[in-house]
Structure formats: structure tokens, C-alpha cells
Amino acid sequence: MYQYDQIDQTLVDERVAQFRDQVARRLSGAISEDEFKPLRLQNGLYLQLHAYMLRIAIPYGTLSSQQLRALAQIGCKYDRGWGHFTTRQNLQYNWIRLEDAADALADLAKVQMHAIQTSGNCIRNTTTDQFAGAAHDEIEDPRVWCEIIRQWSTFHPEFSFLPRKFKIAVTGSPNDRAAVRVHDIGLRMHRNAEGETGFEVIVGGGLGRTPFIGKTIRDFLPKQHLLSYLEAILRVYNQFGRRDNIYKARIKIMVHEIGIDAMREKVEAEWQAIRDGALQLPEDAIDQIAAHFAPPAFERLPGGVAPEYANAFRTDFEFGLWARRNTFKHKRPGYSIVTISLKKEGEPPGDMKAEQMLAVADLADRYSFGEIRVTHEQNLVLPHVKQSDLPAVFKALKAYDLATPNVGLASDIIACPGLDYCALANARSIPIAQQIAQRFRNWERAHDIGELKIKISGCINACGHHHVGHIGILGVDKNGEEFYQLTLGGSADQDAALGDILGPALNTAQTVDAIDALVDAYLRLRTSGEERFLDTYRRVGLQPFKEAVYAAA
């Protein structure tokens, strides 16, 4: 993991001191809420329906056990004993008192964490593949490049007040687990014909009110030119992006309006002026960052199945169910990647109690080199677990209600906080997610259905990524009543696509039944148990699913 140097630590400590003074002036009445708002947003502090919400940055989703323990302690000290993991690989506290906000940031700074650039019209937390450094299909560890982007973008004076917020994602694998095509800039690492590793640069993706799949602006960018090319894109956007209309201020609108060819021409012209300047990355600078992400001290283990794993798989049905869904192939023989589902039936998706955080921190120390990852699908990952240790890990997770075997299944739902917390929401997300999870509680049926990504947003801002759900659910308001619009066929993976609107919005009582009807239609229509919901939808189209829902509605 990256460790702060003195510059990093000083920067974070000084920001805490600045914010402490700003809070004191707000509490004394020296500044108004309108004057305070941009200052608190620059420190990740939002005013929600019931209380302040503090959003903590988790750069590229990587946490140490020490940091996770600190998050648990802060949740107990300043919140209500829990936190909410988000689709930006961050964590939110939903019940922060203004009087405590600076103290919470000071406690974060002690473990090299902060809330900088988790809000505002700036470059937000750069995200990546939660399996980075462990994935068997990885070309190169993308966290190195995320850290380089973090250092370049933090407090960048030219990009601190962009037309609108700006999001970057990086993947180092051909199987995209970072949703790079629905970001303002997506970076996909690959090799060219000469075997050199570089980036496909994708620009203009995004969800929200006007969703777009990003377009490739450059097929191959040599690694040493990454920052200069990003700088060129941001400069063009900063100059030509709209500032007169908040709904048309994102770079995706600019790319859509002028076209990718015109965008490429502007960026290339800007890039030519700066590509060989100070932003060109020297090899030793890259190596210095990469050294922080050196592989841990893996044991040399034999290939094949570990006897401890084989015995547990054969004799313990619950372990076998969990191992099939929640463990994944590691690049090193004898190791596995463990995904910890935060989607237990009855619990809000992405929520985690402090005692559970502490338990996972202990497991990370004992079994995963002290490292934890946050996924953009609101789960956690232990990236480096010996296969022989999986039965012990499962037993420990089960004791803390963290062994739900549903990763990628219908109940592994992405959901924003919705109208239960968010002042922008039109409808509740959490109760719908809970009802759907209960409907698919039968594990035999859930596993028969297979991969099904359901994503729920409480408003058009799409924090639940509903546009790219196999089944997307959008909360809308109709004369003060909560309704839900369904979309089908979305994907955030390497085959990224936006979902198609199924038909008129449904009321709360109809929505869960509609999801059931869609699944039943899929089971009738699929050609085999190997054909996923998404594959079936792409083969047969919208109409059979529409008939299944609205004939019964």
C-alpha cells in the first residue's frame, strides 16, 4: 500500500486545521450557511435530510486493517456505530454532528485518510478494480497509476473549480471490473502490437440525468504520457465545458454535442504543447510509486486444490455455497480472492456495523496481509487469502453475519441511500432492495437464476448506477407518491451498455412483483442454465419481458 510522505501528511493535517476554523466560524455565526456550504463540500461534508453526512475518501478502494479499525472507531465515536460503503469505493457516515466533523477528520488524518475531493466540482476519488494486484487476468496493477493520478489531481489549482464534478476509473484487466466506460475518463490498460503496455483512453461516459457510454479518444497512450494527456483533456473541458446550466455541465454533454472527432482534435492540439514538458513521467518516478505496491510475501504453495479446502467443500454445504459465489481465482497458486458480501437479507446494501469492521480488520491481519478492498458494488474484499485458510475465514465471517453467499446474484443489489437519507431523492431505495432480497432468499432458486445485477437509484442522479443494471430501478415522484421505472439490459462491464426503459413506472407494491415476473420470464426464455439474464435479454429483446410485467400489472 502507498504510505504518506511528509508532504502528504502535512497537506492533510493543514486541511483539518483550516476546516476546524471554518466550522468554528459557522457555529459562531461569523459566516452564513451559504458562505459555509462550498467550504464544507470541499471537505466532504453534506447536509442531508436528517443530519450532516461525511464522505471519506478511500483512494482506489484500498484500505489497511489499521484504517478499517479507525473507520469503525470513528463510526462509534461520532456516528451511530456503522458506515455505508458507496459505489465510489468510499465510505459515508450519515449522522455526523457539525461540532464533531473536524475531530473526525483529525482522527482520519492519524491513519493517513481524509475527505478531500469527495465533493465539489473537482477530480473525485479515482477508482479501480477491487482485485487489483491479485487478479489472474491482470496485465498490470492499476493502483500504481491511480496513485499517480491522485498525487497529480489533489488540490490541482487549475482543476479545483471545474464546470462540474469529474470522475476517473482505471482497469488493468481485459475483464472490466471498474466500469471504465461510464466515467468522465476511463483508462483501460492493454498491450499494443509491439508488446508495450499503455492505455486506451475513453472519454465522455457517465450516468445521471443524461447517461452516455464513453467513447475512445485515443487507442493507445504510452504510460509516460498519462498525466500530460489527462491534463490536456481537463484543460479542454475546463475551457469549453458549459457553466451556464448545471444539467449540461458534464464533459459527456460536451463530447456528445461537439462529437468525439472534434474533441480529439482539441485535446491533441493541447497535448502537443505540453506532452514533452514537466508532466512527462520519468521511469524512476513510476518505479518509486510502484514500489509501494510490491506483492506481499506470498508463500510458495503447490498448485491444485488445498486439502483443507477440498474437505470443507465436500462436508460443509454452507461453505461450498459460499466458496462458489464469494471466492475468485488469484494470480498466485494456492491463494484465493474473497469477496465479503455486505448484502445480508434485511440489511441496507453497503452498510457495515463497527464490530463487523473490526472483525474484518482482524481477518485481514491474520489471513490477507493486512489489506482490504472496497468494491464499487458496495462489498469488501480480502485480496490474498490462502486457499487452505478459506474454511477458517468463512467460519469467522459467519459469526459476524458476513458470510452471505450471494455475490453476483439477485440479492447482491447496488442501492443508494435514497429518500431515507438523501435530500435529492424522489423515492426510497433501501426498502425496495430489502424486499427484493427477501423475495430471492431461496438459495437454490437464486443460484439457478445465476448472475443478475440489480441496481437501484432513488433519483435521476443515478448514485445506484441503475442505468447499467441488468435490471435497473429508478425511483420517481408522481404527485407525491413513490414510483419506480424499470430498465433492462444495462451493463457496466467490458460490454458496457445502457438499459432500455421497460414501460410506465410502477408503484411500490407492484415493483417487487415485477422483478419476480422478469426473472420468471428469463427462466422460461433462456436456452440453458449457462445463458445469463443479460444474454437472454440481448437475444430476445424487450417485448417478451414487457409482456410478462404489464400483463400481470
Image: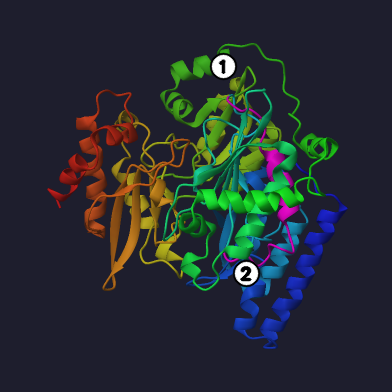
Say which residue appears at 31% left-offset and 27% top-offset.
531
The one nearer the camera, 515 or 152, is 152
Q: Is residue 468 magenta?
A: no
Say which residue appears at 58% left-offset and 29% top-offset.
337
Q: Measure the C-alpha gap from mark 2 to mark 1.
A: 50 Å
Horizontally, residue 348 falls left or right of residue 150, namely left
Under tag 2, what secondary structure?
A: helix
Q: Residue furthest left?
A: 551
Say which residue appears at 52% left-offset and 73% top-offset.
244
Under tag 1, what secondary structure?
A: helix
Horizontally, residue 9 falls left or right of residue 416, namely right
Q: Is residue 372 above or below residue 263?
A: above
Q: Quadrant of residue 471?
A: top left
| Chief SS of the magenta region | loop
Q: Amino acid at mark 1?
A: Glu
Q: Which mark is residue 265?
A: none
Can residue 179 be seen in this snapshot? Answer: no
Q: Position of residue 451 (x, y in %)?
A: 38, 33
Q: Is residue 152 magenta?
A: yes
Q: Quadrant of residue 504?
A: bottom left
- 10 Å crowding of disc 2: few (<14), some (14-19), many (20+): many
Residue hosting label 1: 308
Residue hosting label 2: 41
The one nearer the camera, 371 or 495, is 495
Q: Which residues are magenta?
A: 137-164
